[in-house]
Structures are given as C-alpha cells and as structure tokens.
Image (cartoon, rainbow, N blue to C red):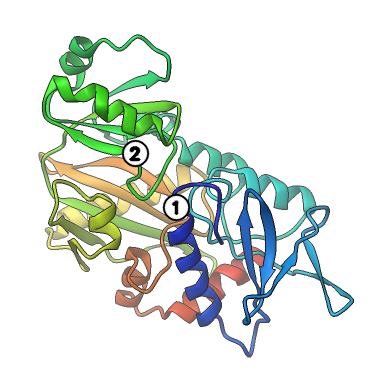
C-alpha cells in the first residue's frame, strides 16, 4: 500500500481494509508501505522495518521473512502502472494484480482506448497533447467541442481532471493536468448516465459484478464526489435490463481483450443508449465505501471472501 502518486492516501486506506479483513485463520498478513524514500513493513505499533529490495524480504527478530503472495493495493504508480508487477514477476512472487504489460497499458488512458477501439468499444472523441507541444485551442475545440474534459493521461482518483466550458479555460486546465503527468488526453463531453462495472476473476471464472450508477453532486465524478461523499453510488444501477446486459457484455469483453486478472473496474457513460468507455482501473478502491466492494456485497460476496479469492487466484 502507499505509492508514489497523489493517490497514496487512498491506497493506505484500501490496504488497511484488506489487512483488517483478511481471514486470520488462513493468512498471516503484513502491512508493507511503498514510498519513494522507503519500503518498510509497519507493525501494529507502527514500528517500521526496512524491506530488502533484493528479494522483497524483511528481517524480524533476527529471522528472515519471505512472503508467499503480495496483495497489491497500490493505486497509481508504481503499483497500477506495471512497475511493481514487473518487479514481482522477476522475483517469481505471486501477486493479486494483472501482469506488467497489462497494468502499463490500462494505466495509460490514450493507449488503452486506442487498443480497444478496433474491438468495437465506443469511446469519447479525443485529442492528445504532450507537455511542450504548441497548443492550438481552436483545433481542440473544433475536434472535441465544448464542454470537454482535460485529463492527465496517467493518473487516477480524478487527480488532474477539469471540465472546461470556455476555450479561454483550456490553458489553466492543461496546467492542472500537467502537474500529474506530461501527457494529456482531452475528451468530448458525453451527456448521459454514468455507470461503473466491476469485473473480477472469482473461483476460476470471469465474473461481472452488479452495476453501479454514479450520480455526482458536483459537475462530474471528481475527487470530492468519489471520496468525500459528494455523490450517490447506486447499486444496482437504475438502468434498463437491455442496457445492463449491453454494458456487462462490453465490460467482460474489455477484461478479456486486455488479458486482465484479479480486480478491475471500468467506467462508462450511456450516449444514445450505447455505453462509451471512459477508463479501466486495475487496482480499484478497496475501502468499505469503495464501489467494487459495494458491488461484491450486492452479489453476495463478503469482503473477506473477495480478498481471500484474490490471493487464492494469485497462488494458482
């Protein structure tokens, strides 16, 4: 838990929930905090012990402890973008997230959407900008229209996202996005019902969880809406059976096309009755208030069963 990005605080919350919820009769769980300046095991008295990065082990009471499996609860870099996956795969250590390439691909919004388009997955109209590019505001507005969304390409939890109504506001929105990443994606505004679909590998099979409808009290599903209660997350979503079936089929297809494992949560907006993909998360929030645990509960899966299953799948 932890990480190098703005999402580290949410990751610490997710990791703590996993730590508290795992079945103590089955697992000896340890909290590992991953930060740029330290990798440490944190005990229940908040005493820190340094992790040996050579083999991801730790020495406790003069005894070397090696782990059987890593439960990856790091949102953002380096846990959701492929770096930790590559490290664990080099060590031959089982982990609960998808593979290195799949993590890197899904964390890069531009690349992920481009990969899925040939499979008939509908998305918003988009325009790409890199830091240092000459910004042609007229061209951007001509392509994506107004209002539009300016997003950091590789960031989560709505960090680096702005909704822009006027051409004059594009420059400041780009500044916000560039604080999170040197690549930006600008997307057309899709006016419709927003839903979130969890897809997991559960007991050996790909399972689509009950769909959540997102109704933000704010202008869009921003950080405050996600984490400070300024939204309604309604599970199951108030959509028609045909819409639910359509988006469930697409979400499962996305999971399969991208060769994902473990948890995933993808976001869609219905436009003219058709779900348009916004993004794919491979380390979704795992706090008790997070969307994926809500969906699992609706499907009759407890948090303990959800987390145990992730470990059992990884150990296969």
Q: Residue furthest right?
A: 62
**What numbered label is drawn on residue 277?**
none
Query: From the viewer's perspective, is residue 261 above or below residue 152?
Result: below
With 161 as the anchor, is 92 left or right in this view?
right
Q: Quadrant of residue 230?
A: bottom left
Q: Quadrant of residue 314?
A: bottom right
Q: Which residue is mark 2?
A: 160
SS at badge 2: loop
Q: Is residue 288 visible?
A: yes
Query: From the viewer's perspective, is residue 183 above or below residue 291?
Result: above
With 194 as the anchor, is 301 left or right in this view?
right
Residue 200 screen position, x and y as percent: 45, 61
Residue 42 screen position, x and y as percent: 65, 72
User: Where does the C terminus fall, quadrant-wise?
Assistant: bottom right
Q: Which residue is mark 1?
A: 7
Query: From the viewer's perspective, is residue 292 above or below residue 257?
Result: below
Residue 286 screen position, x and y as percent: 43, 67
* Residue lying at 66% horizontally and 74% vertically, measured from the top left: 30
SS at badge 1: loop
Nearer to us in this view, 307 or 150 = 150
Crowdedness near tag 1: few (<14), some (14–19) or many (≥20) residues, C-alpha within 10 Å = some
* Residue lying at 32% horizontally and 46% vertically, measured from the top left: 158
């Amino acid at each position: 838990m932890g990480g190098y990005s703005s999402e580290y605080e949410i990751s610490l919350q997710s990791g703590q929930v996993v730590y508290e919820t795992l079945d103590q009769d089955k697992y000896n769980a340890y909290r590992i905090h991953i930060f740029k300046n330290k990798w440490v095991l944190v005990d229940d008295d908040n005493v820190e012990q340094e992790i040996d990065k050579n083999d991801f082990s730790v020495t406790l009471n003069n005894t070397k402890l090696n782990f059987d499996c890593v439960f990856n609860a790091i949102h953002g870099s380096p846990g959701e973008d492929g770096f930790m996956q590559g490290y664990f795969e080099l060590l031959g250590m089982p982990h609960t997230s998808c593979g290195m390439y799949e993590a890197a691909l899904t964390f890069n919004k531009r690349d992920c959407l481009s990969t899925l388009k040939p499979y008939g997955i509908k998305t918003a109209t988009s325009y790409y900008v890199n830091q240092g590019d000459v910004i042609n505001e007229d061209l951007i507005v001509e392509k994506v229209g107004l209002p539009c969304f300016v997003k950091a390409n590789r960031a989560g939890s709505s960090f680096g996202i702005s909704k822009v109504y006027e051409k004059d506001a594009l420059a400041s929105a780009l500044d916000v996005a560039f604080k999170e990443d040197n690549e930006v994606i600008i997307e057309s505004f899709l006016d419709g019902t927003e839903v979130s679909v969890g897809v997991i590998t559960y007991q050996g099979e790909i399972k689509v969880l009950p769909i959540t409808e997102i109704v933000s009290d704010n202008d869009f599903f921003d950080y405050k809406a996600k984490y400070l209660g300024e939204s309604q997350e309604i599970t199951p979503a108030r959509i028609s059976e045909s819409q639910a079936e359509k988006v469930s089929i697409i979400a499962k297809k996305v999971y399969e096309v991208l060769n994902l494992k473990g948890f995933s949560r993808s976001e869609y907006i219905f436009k003219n009755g058709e779900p348009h993909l916004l993004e794919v998360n491979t380390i979704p929030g795992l706090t008790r208030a997070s969307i994926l645990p809500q969906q699992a509960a609706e499907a009759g899966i407890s948090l303990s069963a959800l987390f145990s299953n992730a470990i059992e799948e990884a150990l296969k």
